[in-house]
Amino acid sequence: METLYTDYHRWLHGILQRRLGNRDDAADLAHDAFIRLLTKPRHLSHHTARAYLSRMARGLCVDLWRRREIEQAWLDTLLHLPEQESPSAEQQTAALEALVEIDTMLRRLPDAVAHAFIQSMVHGLTGKEIATQLGVSERTVRNHLSKAMLACLRLQARLEGAGTTAPS
């Protein structure tokens, strides 16, 4: 691992800095990439290490950009809340972490399942309306919603086990 770090850290940091345009973010993500390598040991040759780190860097950048989008949406929401309804700093942090987890969970679901869930829960569409949108039966929509709710329950159990709760 030490050899990989010595051989590829500067290269990886350079790639990340060009993608992100920020030296500090690049340093953080380069560090995260090598931590991931340590926690998921793999035998990487010098030939495969560069490709693996490059792919990991792309994924870490996408994760960072998604998280920042979620953070910005959360901050925009907070700006529109009356002061007496604003959550504490601790509640804000917990809610943001839960939102990131929910986003990750939704992205792991099949597209049709996530779409049905968002249309139902966020936009208030009926099963019939969603079925028409997706070009499927209402029964299929119910199955999609059941899968999404099961994923939500699993996420909730995991978050509660970790001492974090999803926002209500």
Image (cartoon, rainbow, N blue to C red):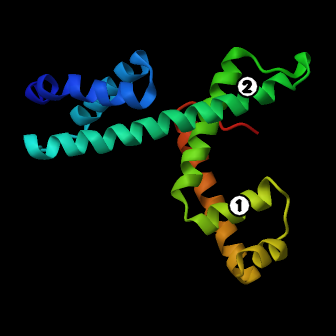
- The image shows a total of numbered marks equal to 2
Residue 164 can be seen, yes or no: no
Residue 4 in percent (x, y) is at: 13, 30
Residue 134 in percent (x, y) is at: 71, 75
Residue lying furthest bottom in this view? 137
Compare marks 2 and 1 and give the one earlier in the sequence: 2
37 over 21 or under it: above or below: below
156 over 85 or under it: above or below: below
**Label drawn at residue 159:** none
Tell me where residue 11 sits by quadrant. top left
Question: Which residue was labeled with disc 1?
Answer: 117
Q: Is residue 168 left or right of residue 15?
A: right
Three-letter code for the amino acid on which mark 2 is drawn: Leu
Location of the C terminus by quadrant is top right
Location of the N terminus by quadrant is top left
Tell me where residue 164 sits by quadrant. top right
Residue located at (23% from left, 35% from top): 37
Q: Nearer the viewer, residue 113 or 164?
A: 113
Residue 26 in percent (x, y) is at: 38, 23
28 over 48 or under it: above or below: above
SS label for mark 2: helix
Residue located at (64% from left, 27% from top): 94
Answer few, some or many: residues within 10 Å of disc 2's Cα (few below 14, many 20 plus, some between 14 and 19): few
SS label for mark 1: helix
Answer few, some or many: residues within 10 Å of disc 1's Cα (few below 14, many 20 plus, some between 14 and 19): many
Question: Which residue was labeled with disc 2?
Answer: 75
Three-letter code for the amino acid on which mark 1 is drawn: Phe
User: Marks 2 and 1, Cα distance to the nearest angstrom?
Assistant: 24 Å
Q: Nearer the viewer, residue 101 or 26?
A: 26
Residue located at (66% from left, 74% from top): 143
Q: Nearer the viewer, residue 129 or 85?
A: 129
